[in-house]
Image (spheres, rainbow, N blue to C red):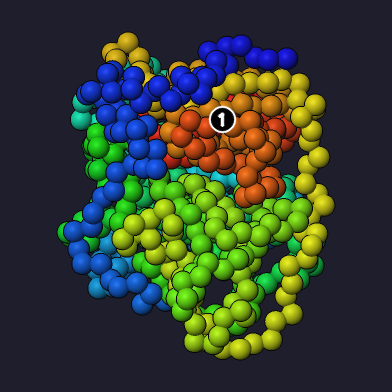
Amino acid sequence: MRESSPYGRGLSRRQVLAIGGALGATAVTGLGAAAALSRHPAATGAELRSAVPLPPPFRVPLPLPAVLAPVSRAGGTDRYAITQREVTAEILPGVRTPLWTYGGTFPGPTIESRRGRPVTVTHRNELPVPTVVHLHGGRTPAASDGYPTDLVTPAGWTQHAGHGMSGHGMSGHGMSGHGMSMHDPRAVTSELTRDYTFPLDQRPALLWYHDHRMDFTAPAIWRGLAGLHIVRDAAEEALGLPAGPRELPLMIADRAFAEDGSLAYPSLDPTLRERPGVREPYVAGVLGDVILVNGAPWPVHEVDAARYRLRLLNASNARHYELAFVDEGDGRLWEFHQIGSDQGLLAAPVTHHTLPMAPAERYDVVVDFSRFPVGSRVRLVNRLGSGRTRDVMAFHVVRKASDDSRVPRVLSTDLPAWRREDAVRVRDFSFRAGRMGEDDTHGWLIGGLPFAPSRTDVTVRHGDTELWRLVADVHHPVHLHLTGFRILSRGGHPPLPHDAGLKDTISLRPGESAELLTRFDAYRGRYLFHCHNAEHEDMGMMANLEVV
């Protein structure tokens, strides 16, 4: 069965490639940057330039986020408490930077949990604006998934104009509300605190949590509201993969710094209280000129001559990476093994020399540093970057060491055995720039429509398997809440090597189509799918998914 609805009309490749020319005519006062992006598809946005001196690379030690201790383990549930609060911290050496944080640090504290053991996190909001917490990659009941209008408000917050629900659209100088009603009768607002409960009945994987407030997700993440959540189980631990100090979580993100040391961001309303959106040159995405790993600029980490497991997350708003490991001695690209993806371990390792990463994607890789002489420096580089953004971090091989870790030929046998013929329904979705409403403003749309919390866009039956066909005009990393998916094809061809395993985010390239196979067998309720270019998401590229 094939769905035919406003959300079921896909664009042909020829139509997609024509979008750039169309935007040039219709978006003179709107998405001019998107038109430029269509003409220059290697770009994903505009880069901010820092106004403070930047440190040389590979001087700052790599920080490792602290693992959060539960406040209780009673009743078979691990309970945690996190206070969202403003702090001032040193990110660039000698420079003080105000941040919005989970628990006072950027990244926030890491939560480590066990498969099938529930976790409840009590979030307390001491920030000046409402927040929402989403566990990205979690199989989560709808009440705890972090729907964008389910706000946790600061004490005494009043329902004044704006309120983070002012709508989507673009004016000549950026994005503003366009008159569409954003009333959400199903929104559940709580004051000061909220409990988020995660059953974690899912495969072990690297997840992450971040703010998901409607219209203001991008600047909130940029200011620091992001952290890691790792799910583990005994089967994975028995594989003999590198562990302990040889397992490194790496949250990669770009930022830029203003003259006073604050994080530069082109918000129309820097208070993030009233008017959403960014200045017009940045509507395709905001890029920074500083690459941070775990909150440190171009850090260095001392390693043994042994295998290391690197848990990679691209937590950038819009920047894409093509990662590679380069020996400084000879400039050679060294191979490494991908063992996992967004939703956990692959069935078998995949060998790479480079690895593309879109915003919100996670990859689990093993690098063997025993191949390098002691004293070597191995750089992790971004082959899509230029100048300072080409470097990410470095590893300094400092000592020989014994190593009993391994990368087994079989990593996992519990990947879902979904088949194309299992799909009971086929749906088509286009991700493109376009008009937001009758006032002729422009934004980022799914199926020709901007996000509206009051509208149900897609209804699926619990337990159904569906085939989704996606098409993009420019780069769009598409994220599906609640469930993972298998990538069946790209542009009518087999998926790429890094597409292996179970994903929850796919990087659609300019003009590209893709087929996904997914099953809605977790929970019922209202969920989302959206572009995880955070600026696109804030400007309308999000849709409602109802599981019944």
Image location of residue 7, percent across then percent down: 54, 17
Foreground pick, 377 / 93: 377
Quarter of the picture holding the N terminus: top right
Type of residue at label 1?
Ser
Seen from the viewer's position, the closer of residues 45 and 324 is 324
- For label 1, the SS is strand
Using the image, determine if residue 51 lies above or below residue 463. Answer: below
Q: Residues within 10 Å of mark 1 (few under 14, many from 20)?
A: many
Residue found at x 58% / y 16%: 8
Which quadrant of the rendered structure holds the C terminus? top right
- Residue 246 point in image, percent of width and height: 61, 74
Query: Which residue is label 1 attached to?
Result: 513
Residue at screen point 56% across, 68% down: 334
As drawn, is 399 to the left or to the right of 464? left
Q: Where's residue 345, x and y in %?
A: 71, 55
136 horizontally vs 132: left or right: right
For the question of whether residue 138 can be seen, the reply is: no
Q: Is residue 61 above or below residue 412?
A: below
Q: Observer-nearest residue: 134 or 458?
A: 458
Q: What residue appears at the point 46 percent right and 19 percent down from the top-left corner?
A: 15
Q: Is residue 224 above or below residue 468?
A: below
Quadrant hosting residue 155: top left
Q: How many marks?
A: 1
Q: Residue at x 71, y 26 (%)?
A: 466
Using the rendered image of the protein, determine whether residue 97 is visible from the camera's viewpoint. Answer: yes
Image spot of residue 141 (x, y percent): 64, 37
